[in-house]
Amino acid sequence: AKYVYDFTEGNKNLKDLLGGKGANLAEMTNLGLPVPPGFTISAEACRHYLAEGSVPEGLDREVAGHLEALESQMGRKLGQADDPLLVSVRSGAKFSMPGMMETVLNIGLNDESVHGLAKQAGGNDRFAWDSYRRLIQMFGKTVLDIDGDLFEHALDGLKGRRQDTDLDAGELQQLVETYKAIVREQTGHDFPADPREQMRLAVMAVFGSWNAPRAILYRRQERIPADLGTAVNIMAMVFGNYGDDSGTGVAFTRDPGSGRQGIYGDYLQNAQGEDVVAGIRNTIPLEDLEHLDRRSYDELTGIMETLENHYRDLCDIEFTIERGKLWMLQTRVGKRTAAAAFRIATQLVDQGLITMDEAVTRITGDQLAQLMFPRFDGGAEKKKIAKGMNASPGAAVGKVVFSSERAVKLSEQGQDVILVRRETNPDDLAGMIAAKGILTSRGGKTSHAAVVARGMGKTCVCGAEELEVLTTEHRFIAPGDLVVSEGDVISIDGTTGEIFLGEVPVVDSAVVEYFEGVSEPSDDLVRAVDRIMRHADGARRLGVRANADTPEDAARARRFGAQGIGLCRTEHMFLGERRQLVEDLVLASTDEARQAALDALEPLQKADFLGIFQEMDGDPVTIRLIDPPLHEFLPDIIELSIKAAKDEATKKDRKLLTAVKRLHEQNPMLGLRGVRLGLVIPGLFAMQVRAIAQAAKEVPGARPEIMIPLVAAVQELESVREESLKILAEVGVEAMIGTMIEVPRAALTAAQIAEAAEFFSFGTNDLTQMAWGFSRDDVESAFFSRYLDLGIFGVSPFETLDREGVGRLMEIAVAEGRSARPDLHLGICGEHGGDPDSVHFCHEVGLDYVSCSPFRIPVARLEAGRAAL
Ligand code: PEP
Ligand code: MG
């Protein structure tokens, strides 16, 4: 097997093998851009290492061969005493995981080669010792697992109030000795002086960092598969820390926040690698590089244009300038906010770089969902206390917390929190996930907080330098000596960067107003959304319906583009004031009493359906007959028992208690509900069908579809169907009669069931519950996090359809059902109908429509379009 690839051997399509960074370094190398030479160890080697605990056979030899080639290309050997080659060892997985895995720079330095490096740099001792101390620090922390604070404290102690650039060569040499002592103390061994040993250990540390807790957490959050492993890139070092003619920076070819075109990035003079992201000194805007180093600036902007045209998308870039010479260290198609994604996609169409079809596939339903988040009410009174950078849009309100642990704790208690930090690092990830928003006082739009928040679609304001964040004292100080303590409520606006004291009311997003038809597409974002949605609607094969059971929801669903109602649950129609009638029904001891209760319910039900038919104006309305067990509509058994024990129960209470006890079930979800209820309580379904028919008769063009829940056997369906057809004929109304497929047996006997059903609608909530044997009301909070840890699934099957299991049942039902009845109409109405991945699956298995909650309809329309393209 081959595990190592020179940068000249790869290309951008080999991300599975070379990781994103390696594949794109190869692509840039082949484009003739200035990339330091190097090679990539494949993710396959990492997978082997993770599985077996050792590197694959022959890897060491292969790496040695590539290193020799690199050495002869560079004309110096790794760590050579008088003229050393130094390398960086960088992680790089298929999907970018910013800052989650390890990188070690300056490999090859030791007590001898540090002098060679100084000589190479024209007698620049300071530079050489600075590079050496960085190596020991990074290597110590990431490879040797030493607490990074030990190094930080030593550095801070030496620096005092100065910046790190103020330390002279002698002080840095002294720091190297201190660092070496820390390594000895913490590990019992000397810092490894052998350059090849340094490299070997660093490679294994990068492999191992795939399973660092923060990497695992990040993958789960971003739904990145746990078994991919990371590639490792070994590249000749170039130095941004030579002096003021050197530096390092990050750049975007467009603004990843808004999507607008322009020069966008941060630059840090006399600095290396991670300094920019870590925010140790304040960066300057990239435009200012023009005045510092015109030639490099022009070359960089030229390369940015080349990259955009080549990738036909926004790219982000890491670069280093070494004594006036520009080097490209990384590029990739860059992350962006949801708004930027829509703007960029349509801009690229207008520039002739991509087609509308491509534009639609470049935007996700999740991004559209983010644009539908509320924003702060412009008219509301606000007390602005400071302004930072608008790092990730949205409006977040919550109690201030200063640590990741506290954020997790309060959010578990159901409280909204804003995580406030001076700056974040990967260890804050759990808190960032738990928080509604993130606020930092340091670092730019490319800081860790900003990058991670944008990736998660979480509101973030960063670099609010007016704030003094006193983490250990659990408070921050805003201008005017305003003290904000832990637990105080603040509101942060990730779109403007503003920070407000107290709770600011939020209003609908402009995109929602556009869907609602309240506003014409006026701003450029809404216009971009409008163009994308129209194209998606034109492309999609799947219909999109709504789960709605009130006229208000039905109306909103239509405004959002629903083409019908795919699930009208009728159980809410038995609540509120109607409880009394349901109690009468359950308590009825004679046929007459029962019929009287049903007769009282019927006109109420009819009025419910009338409202919905009118609202839907001739679009189909699938009405599901009552589904949950009857005791759900009765008073609580405990309440009644207490009353009885206290002797406070009336005669009716006692009757009720008897009924509740009679109806009590150990597993109500698997008990007397759905069609079973319809077959056991005479007249219940008939009443509902009559109400539907009579309402439909009064609304010209109404298209009712009657849906029977929880069917497992065709016999159940047949008897309800017969009775329903009779009632429809009596009233003189036509309606399709179909069933939900939500019991595995129904899926497996779909050919028989289709004989008695004109349509199927997959109830994937129950189908998932019953296929896995997971109680849908209990398991998610009880043990799913453990299952996610164990990698049993990467995402809850209640959220995204489990294609292999539940999806398989659906495939069987589709094939069997259509074979028995070729014009069988097929839909889905479980929660999965609004989940992007599940919508794609429904497209693939050939359903006719998906049905989801009104607010998810635009997402389903977009994803249905993407699935078809
Ligand atoms: C389902 O089971 O997927 C469904 C839509 O029905 P309910 O959620 O009401 O059980
Ligand atoms: Mg169900």
Image: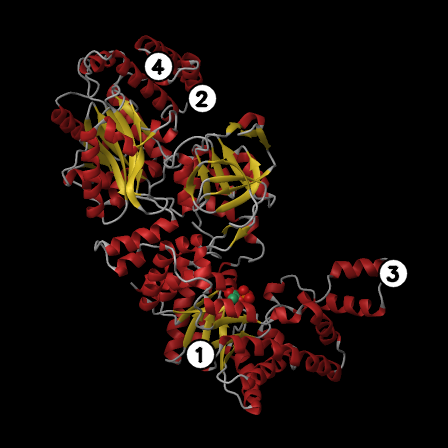
Q: Nearer the viewer, mark 3 or mark 2?
A: 2
* Image mark for residue 754: 1
Residue for badge 3: 647
Q: Nearer the viewer, mark 1 or mark 2?
A: 2
Residue at figure coordinates x 30%, y 24% from the top left: 271
- Tag 4's secondary structure? helix
644 left or right of 183 in image: right
Q: Is residue 853 visible?
A: no
- How far apart in space, not on screen, are marks 1 and 2 (Cα)? 67 Å
* Image mark for residue 166: 4
Q: Nearer the viewer, mark 4 or mark 3?
A: 4
- How far apart in space, not on screen, are marks 4 and 2 (Cα)? 21 Å
As drawn, 178 above or below 796 = above
Q: Quadrant of the N terminus?
A: top left
- Tag 2's secondary structure? helix
Q: Is residue 120 visible?
A: yes
CA neighbours of label 3 inside 10 A, class few (<14), some (14 to 19), many (20+):
few
Residue at figure coordinates x 24%, y 23% from the top left: 246
Residue 731 percent across, percent down from the top left: 57, 90
The answer to which image quadrant residue 205 occupies is top left
Residue 774 percent across, percent down from the top left: 53, 57
| First in sequence: mark 4 vs mark 1 | 4
